Amino acid sequence: MSQVVIVIMIFSLVLAGCSSANNSKPQNENASGSGNSQGKVIELKYWVPFSGSDGEYMESMVKAFNESQSEIKVEFMNNNWDNYYPKLLASLVSNAAPDVAVAHVSQLANLVPTGKLEPLNALATDAGLDWSTFASNQEQSVVRDGDHIAVPLDTHAVVMYYNKKYLSEAGLLNEDGTIKLEPGAEGFTNMLLKLKETLPADVSPLIIGSNNIFTYWIWYALVQQQGGTYFADGVPTIDTPEGKAAMELIKSWIDQGLAPADIGDNSYDIFKTSKAAVTFTGVWSTGNFETEASLEFAAAPFPQLYSQPAAWGDSHTLIVPKQDNREKQVAAVKFANWLADNGHMWAKAGHVPVKPSVLESEEYKALPYRADYAAVMDIVKYMPDSQQLGAVNDAVLESLVEVNYGLKPVEDALKEAQDKANKLVSK
Amino acid sequence: MKQIKSHTYKNYLTALAFLAPFMIIYLWFWIYPILKGFLMSLSKGSLGTAGTFAGLDNYRYLLQDDKFWSTLGNTLYFIVISTPALVILGLAMAMLVNMKLKGTTLLRTAYFMPYMLSISVVGSIWVFILQSRTGLIASTLSSLGIPMNFSFFGSWGMGWLSILIATVWWTVGFNMILFLAGLQEIPDDLYEAADIDGANRWGKFRYITMPSLRGVTTLVIILQTINSFKLFGQTWLITKGGPGTSTTPIVHYIYQIAFRQWDTGYAAAVSFVLFLTIALISLIQYKLLMSKN
């Protein structure tokens, strides 16, 4: 009797394990079962790395797409973001890739060498996708060897958020809600100094991640603003006058008590709970900050502190792996185009839509805050196309964090970062 | 004679039949990947592209790779600071729990519970406790009017201290259980005889407890050393290997080589060297600790 019970229990555990394996439940197994008079429904497998709060927005967009027409049915599969790329790469190499998948522009350099990404110009014509409807900065970022290898979806950048209450108390708020800012790095620093005079003791003028990726992203943007480069002709250019100036500026904020040292991912919370007046953080924080009723904040593109406007950012794009079924590939491009056309839905996650027509639309303009930083997409300086990008970024960040903790002077840190980067690229 | 031989032969076949399912899984999921990994270490090429045979190039590179030596050094440093703490604390906790006073059962559960948590949870907990400004320690101190003007992640020393605290909290319970089992094996009449002879607490510990625990202690030290060699999750989640690379142990570096540099060949080579190092040190430890007999 007890053996039967045990067998039943094991059986039900196995069943439970099998059914929770994938995110979406296929409603009917046979492809032609949806009653479409045209013939078979084209089913697309779609992978995304949105294990954060973005996931639910993408899922509802997929649902809306499926409901809006009956030729194509997209099966949405979410994945953990931190090991998504090894998984996607392995699937491309072993010909087990989905029909369409999200990939960052910065990761295309890792995916293109597999030779498994379908160039899209021919497919785009058949799918009715017009490249000119995309913003030019984003459209250019996906061109390789004269062909587009991905469909841009959004831009997500590091922008500026500020606490309107604190800024106005310090007399630093204009009539239109923008910050009273003198030009240049000096002007910005002076603004922070002024804030320090009126802020309560436990509130920082500026809060940024000082021991995490944000330090790298902000440094990168400041280097680009000086007309500097990160890679030039495939060679890393870290130890440069622009690099030094950028890192010295960041360190000076910490040294002058304008930004606290030793801040990691808690930078979001600190701004959200009004313990800081200004923050540089990702556009994806908008949704998070909105939920805090007591926070009166505004958003703006990353401020120009040097001679050129520039910001760090990346874009989500959709890639179409190579496969025999061309019909599915055309459907994938149609789907990608639909996602871009409906960017106001994706913008709820805080990202900037990629089509100017969406930015002009009523639905987008009705969303709070997002239109205020949409302009950042034109000044994003995408990271260089290199398979060693991730490793070099890590190496540079290691050295920059040491500067923030006061363990190394800027010159030594940049020299060390340059050496490490050279070694990685020449391996 | 022939009859006995065929009987043994039959036994052998039966044994093989029972072992076969496990052996197949063991060979396919353990031995084969280790061999494949070694072959991978002899090739060059990134994840996703076919590798080209490169002989011992990866091993040659390893010898002059500063980060390999520094991360290996970090790992050895961690072993030196953590092994005594984890062994001594484990023993102390086991002895406390073994006294069977009121509340020791509760203590035993409390000491062991962290071991059941996953590394992600442990990482989140300790970041929450140790981080500046918003962390538990920081906000408790500031509500008492004391600003926390040091950082748990800001230097080599503090970084390793944070990793040590998190690791001890997480895993000492396991050592406690092993020692507890060992303590409960010791017959009570040994202690009674010592009492009759007028031995004090320290005497009993030194002449009865410690010798009886020789086997368990060796086991705990060797297991602890091997586990400390594998340190990764805590540094990845709590200090991110920083500042700089001061809290980057070798497995953390292997992860970076494989999944940030996409250099699976070199990662395999470093892994293999780590494997040989662990095997060698475990062997030495075993010989040293058991030879005192």
Image (cartoon, coloured by chain):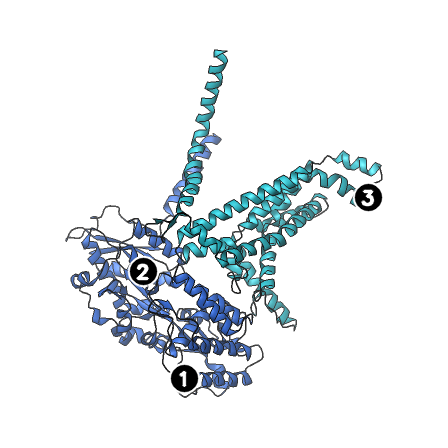
Chain colours: A blue, B cyan
Label 2–label 1 contact, CB within 8 A: no
Residue A149 percent coordinates (x, y): 25, 62
The answer to whether dots 3 and 1 both sit on one chain is no
Instruction: Answer with left or right where residue A68 lies relative to residue B268.
Output: left
Question: Is A356 located above or below residue B235 in the figure?
Answer: below
Residue at the spot of label 1: A178
Question: Is A215 located above or below residue A56 in the figure?
Answer: below
Q: Residue type at mark 1? A: Thr
Q: Residue B41 shows which numbered tag?
A: none
SS for callout 2: strand
Residue A394 percent coordinates (x, y): 44, 63
SS for callout 3: loop
Q: Can residue A291 be seen?
A: no
- Estimate the spatial distance between the alpha carbons at disc 2 and disc 3, rounded to whole Å: 70 Å
Q: Residue B200 shows which numbered tag?
A: 3
**Where, by quadrant of the figure, is residue B16 drawn?**
top left
- Estimate the spatial distance between the alpha carbons at disc 3 and disc 1, rounded to whole Å: 77 Å
Residue sitting at x 19%, y 68%: A130
Residue at the spot of label 2: A102
The chain identifier of the residue carrying mark 2 reads: A
**Where, by quadrant of the figure, is residue B285 drawn?**
top right
